[in-house]
Amino acid sequence: MDTFTIGGDLDVHRLGFGAMRITGEGIWGPPDDPEEAKRLLRHVVEVGVDLIDTADSYGPEVSENLIAEALHPYPDGLVIATKGGLRRTGPGQWPRDARPERLKKACEASLRRLKLDRIDLYQLHSPDPQVPYEDSVGALKELQDEGKVRHVGISNVSVEELHRARGIVEVVTVQNRYNLEDRGSEDVLDVCEEAGIGFIPWFPLATGRLAKPRDALDRIAEEQDATPAQVALAWLLARSPVMLPIPGTSSIEHFEENLAAARIELSDDELAAIGSAAQG
Ligand SMILES: NC(=O)c1ccc[n+]([C@@H]2O[C@H](COP(=O)([O-])OP(=O)(O)OC[C@H]3O[C@@H](n4cnc5c(N)ncnc54)[C@H](OP(=O)(O)O)[C@@H]3O)[C@@H](O)[C@H]2O)c1
């Protein structure tokens, strides 16, 4: 599998793992079978995935705790990317809170839960309309200056917000919603590609919707002896060398299926056919 270097010094395979789905329903509380979630996490790392995306708000706390329970002490080279900036008030509820003092507390708590001295990639989950964006990003810069955070990423941003953040701190990744059907962040991806910033597309399978048979995706999947989910992920990987998809799953079977997408090579004609059918 291809690799990408985040921030000049973190080499990761380009297909990572999203650890949001290892929690309870509504990303709230523990999963039905925490031991199975830990087995999945250990398996993810054993087969060579070295980028795991999580957040303090997944559970909340549940995803980070399971990662530490399953994987600490961490193998060399494993990059755990977490986030702060959202609060949880119930299942499916995600109010923003990116006040500097709260971000600093959130980062300290993530460090404790993950049993780390420094977080390799700390991401601001979302701009908070109640707080000047510069203040929130500035808090992450201070955490970096204090040695608590190695690299800073941002998430759910426009091109303009990306430019503002880059005026304050070196931004090494952007995590925005992006998949075959939803390319609203194409302009942000273009800026990332030009600047060598990693682009982490969340919702890469549109909650499994893209795993279902459909037109060109289905036809090309059949020709490639692959599944639609694999073709949707292979399309993402082919879309840009800075693309770092983090498909999320609670199932080892789906994880294996998704990982195998990295082996699929799509021709230019296939890429164009998949891309235009999904947009049509
Ligand atoms: N920055 C942000 O604001 C933000 C927001 C949302 C998510 N994220 C991150 O992005 C990651 C991925 O996003 P996501 O989990 O929302 O979307 P996703 O990866 O597109 O979809 C995950 C869903 O698809 C299903 N799925 C996965 N692989 C499948 C397969 N091969 N066949 C059929 N169904 C499959 C999963 O169900 P099963 O569990 O049954 O496999 C799960 O319900 C998250 O884990 C999280 O780390 C970030």
Image (spheres, rainbow, N blue to C red):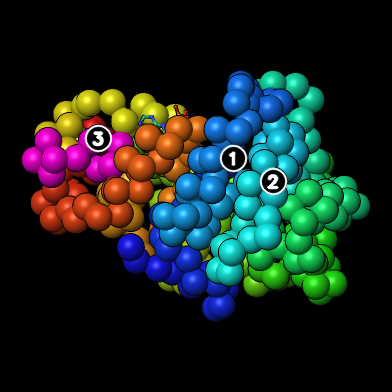
Task: Residue 26: give its label.
Answer: none
Which residue is located at x 79 percent, y 25 percent? Answer: 89
Which residue is located at x 68 percent, y 55 percent? Answer: 72
The residue where tag 1 is placed is: 38
Q: Please provide percent x and percent y for residue 108.
A: 85, 55
The residue where tag 3 is placed is: 228
Looking at this view, is 277 or 129 the one in front? 277
Q: Amino acid at mark 1?
A: Lys
Tell me: is circle 1 under 8 Å from ligand 1: no
Neighbourhood count class around disc 2 (C-alpha, 10 Å): few under 14, some 14–19, many 20 upward = some
Instruction: Of the two numbered discs 1 and 3 on the same chain, state the one appearing first in sequence.
Output: 1
Q: Please provide percent x and percent y for residue 78.
A: 57, 63
Q: What's the distance in space between the residues labelled 1 and 3, CA to CA?
A: 27 Å
Q: Are marks 1 and 2 in contact (CB under 8 Å)?
A: yes
The residue where tag 2 is placed is: 69
Q: Please provide percent x and percent y for residue 280.
A: 23, 32
Residue range of the region highlighted in magenta in the rendering = 222-232
Q: What's the distance in space between the residues labelled 2 and 3, CA to CA?
A: 33 Å
Q: Is residue 31 left or right of residue 257?
A: right
Tag 1 secondary structure? helix
Q: Amino acid at mark 2?
A: Glu
Which residue is located at x 54 percent, y 78 percent? Answer: 8
